[in-house]
Image (cartoon, rainbow, N blue to C red):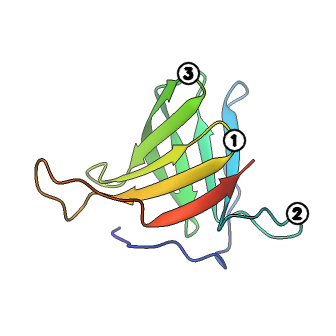
Amino acid sequence: MKFAALIPTLALLAVATPANATTIRCQAGVFWFDNAKADVTVTIDEDRNSGTINVFGVTHAAACTVKGLERRCDFGEDFDYALVIEPGGNARYYDFSQTRSGQSVRPSQLFTCK
């Protein structure tokens, strides 16, 4: 599934979470609204190398890394998309699906995560 931006009014389906996994909920934009649904749910497995990302009600397998306090999960059919979550809860979404080797990409969507 290819997409350029995530829309803040998405419905979220429940995701089964392993016992020792880390779950992070994100909302589009720079503010967290307690009464709003999460647009993206990231689950990083206990091994800290794998997980899932639920977007648009669809769960994608993810290759995750944790470096210090920063978390990154790559997902999509060819792992062309990435969500990078900073320690303060800000996250950046990247779409690498149309890039060429050596080309830089700027984030196309910002999120606030808990």
Residue type at mark 3 is Gly
Residue drawn at x 75%, y 47% as measured from the top left: 114
Viewer-side label of 1, 2: 1
Q: Which mark is residue 88?
A: 1
Residue 111 placement, left or right of 36 = left
Whether residue 17 can be seen here: no
Q: Is residue 33 found left or right of 90 in the rendered image? A: right
Label 1, label 2: how many angstroms apart (C-alpha)? 17 Å
Mark 2 and mark 3: Cα distance apart in space:
28 Å
Q: Quick check: 53 left or right of 95?
A: right
Q: Which residue is mark 3?
A: 68
Q: Which three-letter amino acid code belongs to the residue tagged 2? A: Asp
Mark 2 in CB contact with mark 3 (< 8 angstroms): no
- In the depicted view, which residue is nearer to us: 90 or 40? 90
Q: Secondary structure at mark 3?
A: loop
Quadrant in which the N terminus is drawn: bottom left
Identity of the residue drawn at 56% across and 21% down: 68
Q: Are marks 1 and 3 in contact (CB under 8 Å)?
A: no
Which one is earlier in the sequence, the residue at label 1 or at label 3?
3
**In the image, residue 91 lies at what x, y percent?**
57, 51
Marker disc for residue 69:
none
Q: Residue at position x 39%, y 44% from top?
A: 74
Question: Contact (CB < 8 A) between labels 1 and 2?
Answer: no
Instruction: State the residue position of label 2.
Output: 34
Disc nearer the start of the sequence (2/3):
2
Q: Residues within 10 Å of mark 2 (few under 14, many from 20)?
A: few
Mark 3 crowdedness (10 Å alpha carbons): few <14, some 14-19, many ≥20 = few
Q: Where residue 104 appears, x then y in whole percent?
A: 23, 53
Q: Earlier in the sequence, mark 1 or mark 2?
A: 2
Where residue 19 sits, quadrant-wise, is top right
